[in-house]
Amino acid sequence: MGEVCVRVAVRIRPLLPKEVLHNHQVCVRVVPDSAQVMLGSDRTFSFDHAFGPTASQDQFYESCVKPLVASLVDGYNATVFAYGQTGSGKTYTLGGGHVASLVEEESGIIGQAAADLFLLLGERRAADVRSAADVRVSYVELYREELRDLLELHTAHRELHIREDDRGNTVVVGARETVITSAEELQSVLEAGNALRHTGPTQMNERSSRSHAIVTVQLTQHNHDDGSVRSSKLHLVDLAGSERAARTGNTGLRLKESVHINTGLLALGNVIRALSDPHRRGNHVPYRDAKITRLLRDSLGGSAHTLMVACVSPSHHNVTETLSVLQFASRAR
Ligand code: ADP
Ligand code: MG
């Protein structure tokens, strides 16, 4: 893939039944046969991909994420993150992330990526019986700049640390890694993690709007002919709601939360911008500004492939937030 390592996709969800019921008007559309979206009647924004309300999970996966899974098997790191206001479709698009055991008609990115990964690994193994691979998954939550392990009930409150090893790999020290051998197994591991995050769906939604959830799929491939080992990983990140970025008027705990969320989202925006700006190649990339960028460091930039999915609501009630998400996303290119 060479030059372009950051791609940006926008996805506009359909109006929800209750929005239709309350007569919400659609204020944002995909410009036909383009990767542009139009807000209102005159503001257009350009992206690498744009999907409207009728796009299926399959279409989204095939055009945006499938190439990243292929590159993972080729030994490259990759990151997919979903950005957008609460209720815009981040979790729906990722699938299996924040939502507890949702039975979706079609599975989202996580389920499809896992299915594809095991298919590709099976093909490799069929072609060369002396190759072997193992897949491990970890699932952590980042809330107010603190990391929490969602796969380890008893140590959920133990502190996790981000370290960089001598080969430049980022590791979350103390995070549990579970070996998985199928896409179904991944789904059940994540569901157990989701159960740990909350006790009821309302609380869940509250929490998911204020924290980042990071699923990491770590692939290790062994070649028994030459004894080589190749490691690569894919991060799938459900970010805190963009509306949580610092707002004037917030006080106390809410203010502290907002400051942390703002720091994280801003830092991510700055890193992405630095990576996609050709004039800044080789210049300073501000990874250290927040935990989310420190954690993703070895999978953003360099030889890694990054996809930012900007999710937006079509409703005119959300026009202000939609504008700010489109601006954030178009600046990332
Ligand atoms: P977020 O994670 O950004 O807060 P959700 O993924 O929970 O948002 O989506 C909010 C609601 O919209 C959910 O009821 C979800 O099922 C629905 N939804 C989101 N995107 C789509 C889509 N592309 N097609 C159909 N329904 C969607
Ligand atoms: Mg969500």
Image (spheres, rainbow, N blue to C red):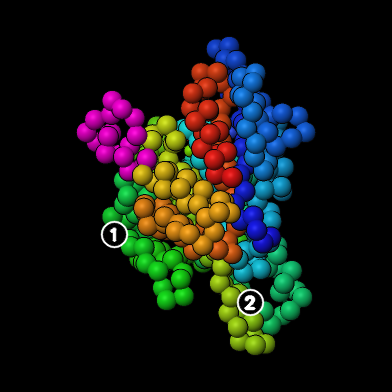
Neighbour tally class for label 1: few under 14, some 14-19, many 20 plus, Cα within 10 Å: few
Q: Is residue 250 magenta?
A: yes
Q: Residue at x 72, y 48 (%)?
A: 62
Q: CA distance from mark 2 to mark 1?
A: 33 Å
Mark 2 beta carbon near ligand 2 (under 8 Å): no
Q: Which residue in the protein does label 1 denote?
A: 159
Judge whether residue 157 can be spotted in this image.
Answer: yes
Q: Measuring from the top left, give residue 23's x and y in whole percent.
A: 58, 11
Q: Nearer the viewer, mark 2 or mark 1?
A: 1
Neighbour tally class for label 2: few under 14, some 14-19, many 20 plus, Cα within 10 Å: some
Q: Which residue in the protein does label 2 denote?
A: 132
Q: Residue at x 44, y 59 (%)?
A: 284
Q: Residue at x 28, y 34 (%)?
A: 254
Q: What amino acid type should be assigned to the residue bearing mark 1?
A: Glu
Q: Quadrant of the C terminus?
A: top right
Comparing 145 with 205, the one in front is 145
Q: Quadrant of the N terminus?
A: bottom right
**Against 24, is 235 above or below?**
below
Q: Secondary structure at mark 1?
A: loop
- Farthest residue toward the front? 279
